Image (cartoon, rainbow, N blue to C red):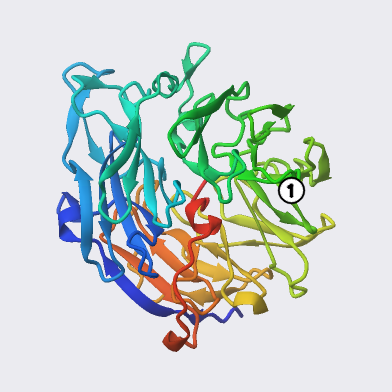
Amino acid sequence: MNTSQPAHLYRRVAIPDAFLNETDGKAWGGDIRIGDLTGDGTVDFLVYKSLGGIHPCFIGAFTLAGEPLWSIGDKHLKIRDADAEDTYLTTLSPDRPGPVAIYDIDADGQAEVICFWIDTDVPAVSKWDLSAIRLMILDGATGAIKRSTAPETLRQCNAYAEGERHIPNYVHQRLMIANFSGNAQPQDFVVKVGVNVLAFNHALEQLWQYTDAWFRYPKHSAYIPAVGDFNSDGLDEVNGGNFGLAADGTVLWNRYFGENTDSVLVTEWNGDKSAILSGGGQVLDAEGNPTLSLGFDVVPHGQEIRCGKLLSDTSEDALVIRYNGHHSDLMVVDKNGQIRNQFRVDETPNNTGLEVIRWHGAEGPELIYSPAALYNSAGDKVVTFPELPTPTGGKMGWYHCFPADVCGDAREEVILYDPYSDAVYIYTPLPFQPDLFGGYQHTERQYNTRLMD
């Protein structure tokens, strides 16, 4: 019989009333981002909403105490729908976690907010293109605009390819922070919109553009690329699944690896950073050659893949894969490609949201988050989250997870939010030791968090 222990509810952070919308009598905030916006060593939060569920149009910043810091935009914005006569696009909770990131992109020692933003003075907008979208960098502490530009290459991006609309390939628009320029810290970012992959630096100057040939579902490339230095040249590369790109946009590989390469990683694997694909459970070398391939009979639909120290031997890396599409089936695979366990987690509306949590700190082993509990590699539900309300339903109405050391004791907390809820929940391991607080650390596990695929 599985026995689980409740986590300690460190904080329920109410989203400020001024940042909430109400639908059918229920208050909701939207998508969440985390980071130290004020530079005081504690975590802060952003909540944002999007016109038509795609184009960001409102951002509100607030503290760990739930106090508002600043906001921009109109949480009730509506603009005429360019694709439907006499119809308006309204402001919604984002369809997917989208193009908003918190990071010190200009290396001034203070966090910025990098985001897409809707032009509000246009007579009509299509949710299926970026013709009314600009890039902005905001001061994290005040929300003041530090930079803004509307590059034509970005505005030409849309959901169409070869005359057809490919919605799944388009809706996952995420800004991934990267080091393409060789600066002391990452100061660039990349975004994939439809078939277009665009890279920009901290001055919002475009570095390069790539066109992806693999867009037809289910033979698509990864919905959200991953970045990291997997060829040890000191710069970041892009793992797009069916394509790999060097820091300057040069193509490292362009080949079809199999169906449903929904999720990709760049992470430590057997001592080196490697590119990892959910489709077929594959690990690639720097030229895109598989060094491990579980095969599509083992991983028929690689919905999500994560890597961590999941086994009792915490010196070894292991993969956890949601291997059967939008279902609750998980498997744990060791470094030799041996399946160590297969099990089912709780059902959720979308059956996504896989993450690895360093719940025990350096002691390990790490645990597996699937909404909304923690499991060990044997499939036991070992941690539950008390006082967590039932999610509100709908395809995205479940608890998305940020792993983050919020309490500063070297163990990771679990930060949970439902985009249709009015609060953020932070859980920490027991025993709770507030005297060990050493300050929140913002790492790539937070600013490039996967959230979902």
Q: Residue at image x 35%, y 59%?
A: 37
Tell me: residue 294, above or below residue 430: above
Type of amino acid under label 1? Ser
Quadrant of the image containing the N terminus: bottom right
Tell me: residue 113, above or below residue 169: below
Q: Residue at image x 46%, y 40%?
A: 202
Where does the image place residue 35, in percent across and percent down from the top left?
40, 59
Left or right: 233 as drawn, with respect to 406: right
Q: In this orientation, does residue 263 appear?
A: no
Query: Of residues 67 and 215, which is closer to you in this image?
Result: 67
Tell me: residue 257, above or below residue 131: below
Q: Secondary structure at mark 1?
A: strand
Q: Residue at image x 34%, y 75%?
A: 11
Where does the image place residue 118, in percent across and percent down from the top left?
28, 31
Query: Of residues 172 and 266, which is closer to you in this image?
Result: 266
Instruction: List the residue tagged with mark 1.
Output: 274
Query: Of residues 155 and 208, which is closer to you in this image?
Result: 208
Name the quadrant containing residue 133. Answer: top left
